[in-house]
């Protein structure tokens, strides 16, 4: 039998973890976007040191599991506590929230960098030639031609990456953060009712994903006027 009272109590408890999940998602996506832009610039700049540094960053963080990265930052950096204290960084790295945020940002930044790079390379060369023929300088050409076209190309893949970050925040529970999954594990330890709790937790992640998908569709419609449904012409 379904225990409605238990489900209601579970939903109310899991609601308390939604702000932390959203905070981790928003912070890591924002910081990861900055890292991705820098890494994509390094890959496309033609400057050998920047290119190889970006390649190394992308290779390391795409080639290792996110859980290992979280553990390395949270547990591994603790071995360098005197050095971090001397640099004034220990107040940051001793907090699980900032460690999880940094790991998520570094991880998503590596994947997003390749999305950005692929989007820029997908801009038709004819559009760039036309912009140069109009006398556009490099900065103006990037702002008016490359950036809008690359954004349209990158948006679907970038949306998938944002959704992946939402689900990846569940790993923050492994370092004592009480986001949705962390609260779910606590409830299971108290009630031994894993099915109901995890179904409710999964429903929360589905709801967050649904909201993100809706926002991405609106962004795609705004960036792609040619894909919007055209109004039906009425006879005079």
Image: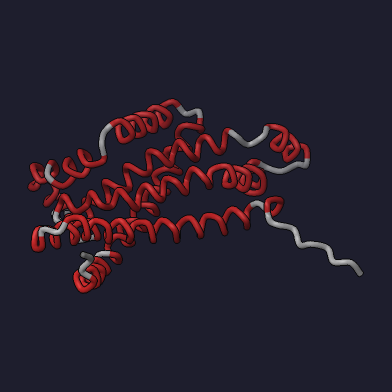
- Percent of width and height locating residue 21: 29, 60
State left or right for residue 235 relative to residue 22.
right
Q: Nearer the viewer, residue 142 or 178?
A: 178
Q: In this view, does 200 lie to the left or right of 37?
A: left
| Figure check: 56 above or below 130 | above
Nearer to us in this view, 143 or 193? 193
**Camera-nearest residue between 145 and 1:** 1
Residue 143 is situated, as x and y percent measured from the top left of the image, at 62, 48
Residue 26, picture quadrant: bottom left
Image point (21%, 44%), residue name:
70
- Left or right of residue 172, residue 114 in this image: right
| Vertical order, 56 against 227 (above or below) | above
Q: In which quarter of the image is the N terminus?
A: bottom left
Q: Nearer the viewer, residue 150 or 137?
A: 150
Location of residue 117 in the rendering, given as x and y in whole percent from the top left corner: 50, 36
Q: In the image, is residue 168 above or below residue 10?
A: above
Residue occupying image coordinates x 73% and y 40%: 131
Q: Is 124 drawn above or below residue 149 in the view shown?
A: above
**Residue 177 in view:** no
Instruction: Check the picture and name the quadrant holding the C terminus.
Output: bottom right
Q: In the displayed image of the protein, which residue is found farthest to the right? A: 236
Q: Position of residue 12 (x, y in %)?
A: 24, 72
């Amino acid at each position: 039998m379904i225990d409605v009272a238990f489900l209601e109590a579970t939903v109310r408890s899991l609601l308390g973890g939604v702000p932390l999940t959203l905070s981790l998602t928003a912070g890591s996506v924002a910081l990861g976007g900055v890292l991705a832009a820098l890494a994509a610039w390094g890959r496309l700049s033609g400057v050998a040191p920047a290119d190889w540094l970006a390649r190394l960053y992308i290779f390391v963080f795409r080639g290792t599991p996110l859980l290992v990265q979280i553990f390395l930052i949270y547990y591994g950096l603790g071995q360098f506590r005197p050095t971090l204290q001397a640099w004034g960084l220990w107040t940051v790295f001793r907090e699980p929230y900032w460690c999880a945020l940094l790991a998520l940002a570094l991880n998503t930044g590596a994947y997003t960098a390749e999305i950005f790079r692929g989007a820029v390379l997908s801009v038709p060369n004819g559009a760039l030639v036309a912009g140069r023929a109009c006398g556009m300088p490099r900065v103006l050409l990037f702002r008016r031609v490359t950036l809008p076209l690359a954004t349209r190309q990158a948006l679907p893949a970038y949306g998938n990456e944002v959704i992946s970050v939402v689900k990846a925040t569940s790993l923050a529970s492994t370092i004592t953060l009480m986001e949705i999954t962390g609260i779910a594990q606590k409830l299971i330890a108290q009630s031994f009712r894993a099915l109901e709790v995890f179904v409710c937790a999964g429903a929360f992640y589905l709801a967050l994903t649904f909201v993100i998908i809706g926002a991405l569709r609106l962004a795609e419609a705004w960036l792609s006027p040619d894909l919007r449904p055209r109004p039906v012409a009425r006879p005079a």
